[in-house]
Amino acid sequence: MNHPQASGTTCSGQPVRILEVERDADLKSFIDLPWKLYEGDPNWIPPLKRELKELLDPGTHPFWQFSERALFLACRGTEPVGRVAAIVNHNHNRFHNERAAAWGFFECANDKGAAEALFSRVQKWGKEKGMDILRGPLNPSTNYEIGMLLEGFDSPPTFMMPYNPPYYLELIEACGFQKEKDLLAYSVDRNWQPPDWVGNVARKILSENNVRVRHIQMERLETEVHLIKEIYHDAWFDNWGFVPMTDAEMDMMGRKLKRIIDPKLVFFIMLEEQPVGVGMIVPDINPLLRHFNGRIGLSGWFKSLLHRREITGLRGMIFGIKKRYQQMGLPLVAFDYLYRGLLENSSLSRYRTLELGWNLEDNDLINKWYDDGGAKVVKKFRIFSKRI
């Protein structure tokens, strides 16, 4: 595979200059940089530039109502060769009683000098804010896209999962960062068949505990989204890195996902007619994003029609069971529901793969359920940290 190497060879002898992004032109350079770095890489998926700009905009995105950030570009001469965001998430720090800064949206040529200069500037910014930990990559928090790809470079990422060239690990470790946590992505394909006992146990749980599964009700989406938030917060409350999403964040995420979700793939596990678990699976639209190349434009509708058959994968974005019900085996009910749905529902027959993740490497309970259900780890990601 042709991974990008150090760019800007004509100016490689020039010193690194760190520029804080304040002008529109600099923001454009910040957003556009990956198109140069990943040129020729068949597995990179271009993000939508408009959505990235919105996510980074303190005046638009609700994440910045409780956070602050600075954006930095590394240049050699006039040519940008790297970028990074420095972030303080005050909700995270209050929730975890930390003084942590984060870094995210990192992209860089294979240029240790540029990477070191970028992280030196982020560290200085974090110290000025009174922080004593620097953690990343978080883009911009654990409720969004996070992690650096360590294993699984042979295939494109699924929707809202990260991708980077292998040399990023060397750049990050050279800047003094160490592993804090690894994240796992599991996968099953169309030929997946969980062990017979999974279906037997699932049916027993359904029959003996007044458990059923229901689809999301799109006509009352706002209410359903807040129900997802309630279950997600209860399920993940004491997990590493968790920070509650605000109503405004959840509403924005719901509006964006409404465009792509299939109601048959977003479901609640009901116990005594009360929702105690949730699964949110979305079509992996990354093959379509590849054709958009950063902009939907006037041809977006035509491209959607032309290339939608390439959407043959799914991504499991959210799965959670309320804490008090996590020993009931309800993940097996979800596994059995998905297996039968993908196999028996003709409208889902085009989907060939399902990626489940990310999962914390030490979330032993859910990982065991996935292992027992026949899913396999296909990608690994890492979160790094250092004291500052």
Image: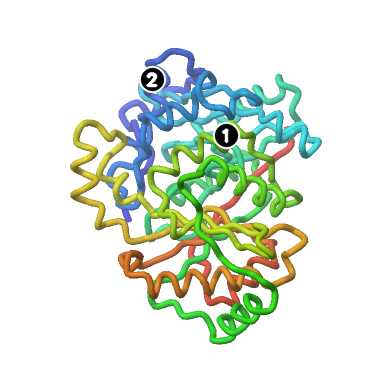
Q: Which residue is drawn at 46% across and 59% down?
A: 265
Q: Which of 91 and 185 is in front in this view?
A: 91
Count the marks: how many? 2
Q: How is the image coloured?
A: rainbow
One can see residue 358 in this view: yes
Of marks 2 and 1, the one in the foreground: 1
Reading the image, the residue beneath label 1 is 249
Q: In this view, does 196 lie to the left or right of 97?
A: left
Q: Position of residue 305 (x, y in %)?
A: 21, 48
Q: Position of residue 298 (x, y in %)?
A: 20, 31
Displayed quadrant of residue 235: bottom right
Q: Is mark 1 on a helix, strand or loop?
A: helix
- Packing grade of label 2 (10 A; few <14, some 14-19, many >=20) is some
Amino acid on which disc 1 is placed = Glu
Q: In this view, does 68 lie above or below 284?
A: above
Which badge, 2 or 1, is on the more N-terminal residue? 2
Amino acid on which disc 2 is placed = Gly
Residue farthest toward the top in the current orientation of the protein: 23
Marks 2/1: CA–CA distance: 39 Å
Q: In which quadrant is the C terminus drawn?
A: top right
Q: Where is residue 78 in the image (x, y as percent from the top left)?
A: 36, 19
Q: In this view, does 362 lie to the left or right of 302?
A: right
Reading the image, the residue beneath label 2 is 77
Q: Which of 167 and 13 is in front in this view?
A: 167
- Packing grade of label 1 (10 A; few <14, some 14-19, many >=20) is some
